[in-house]
Image (cartoon, rainbow, N blue to C red):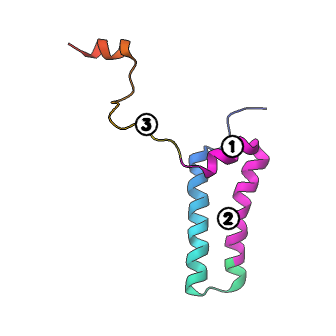
Amino acid sequence: MSTQPSVPVARTRIKLVVFAAATIVAAAVGLPGPAVAALALTSLAIPLAVVLAGGAPLLRELLLPPSRPPVGRGLGHTPEERERFVT
C-alpha cells in the first residue's frame, strides 16, 4: 500500500473547514434539520475517511495546522547553498 495519500491532506483540510462552516451557517440561518444534519454528518465523515485511509498519523496531519518555518530564517537554505548565493 502506498504511503502517499491519493488526495493531498491540505485539500481535504479545506473541504473539512468548508463543510464545518456550512454546517454552522446552515444552523444559524435556520435551514431545515435534515439539511443541517447532512452537512454535520459529512463534516464528521471526512475525518473518519481519513482515519480509514491512512490511520492516526494522517488524521493528526489533517486536524493539526501545518507548521510554519521560523521567522527570520530566510528561505531555509543550507550553509553551502548560502555560500553559493553570496557574490
- How far is mark 3 from mark 1, CA to CA? 21 Å
**Circle 1 sits in a helix, a strand or a loop, which is it?**
helix
Counting other residues with Cα less than 10 Å from the Cα at mark 1, is it few (<14), some (14-19), or many (20 or more)? Answer: some
Question: Badge 2 is on which residue?
Answer: 43
In-front residue for pair 49/6: 49
- Residue at the image position 38 percent from the left and 22 percent from the top: 77
In the image, is residue 15 above or below residue 39? above
Q: Which residues are magenta?
A: 37-65
Tag 1 residue = 58
Predominant SS along the magenta part = helix
Q: Residue at x 36, y 29 (%)?
A: 75
Q: In the picture shown, does residue 47 fall above or below 31?
A: above
Q: Position of residue 36 (x, y in %)?
A: 67, 78
Q: How would you rate the neighbour count of disc 3 (Cα within 10 Å): few for under 14, some for 14-19, many for 20 or more?
A: few
Amino acid residing under circle 3? Pro
- The amino acid on which the numbered mark 1 sits, given as a three-letter code, is Leu
Query: Spatial distance from mark 3 to mark 2, Cα to Cα?
Result: 29 Å
